[in-house]
Image (cartoon, rainbow, N blue to C red):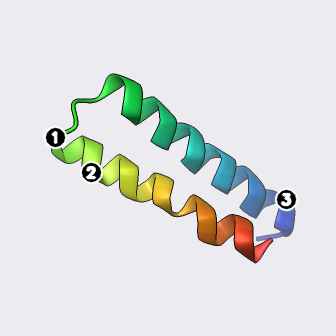
Amino acid sequence: MNRQQIKLLAITAMTIDHIVLVFVPSGSLLYFVMRLIGRLTAPHMALC
């Protein structure tokens, strides 16, 4: 993957994280899985 693709992946993960905060109940399994995906944003952006 090149740098641009990594940035787009991180932006997508951050967007998923923010959408989950608004629309998914906090106790569900989907909430925790999607938040985990969103938490991958920081390492990806630091890599770039």
Residue at the farthest bottom position: 47
Q: Residue at x 44, y 56 (%)?
A: 37
Res. 42 image quadrant: bottom right
The amino acid at mark 1 is: Ser
Residue annotated with mark 1: 28
Residue 15 placement, left or right of 4: left
Residue 7 placement, left or right of 30: right
The amino acid at mark 2 is: Phe
Residue annotated with mark 3: 4
Residue annotated with mark 2: 32
Q: Earlier in the sequence, mark 3 or mark 2?
A: 3
State the CA–CA distance, disc 1 to disc 2: 7 Å
Q: Residue at x 35, y 23 (%)?
A: 23
In the depicted structure, whether residue 22 falls above or below residue 41 = above
The amino acid at mark 3 is: Gln
Q: Earlier in the sequence, mark 3 or mark 1?
A: 3
Q: Residue at x 58, y 46 (%)?
A: 14
Provide the secondary structure element on which disc 3 rests: helix
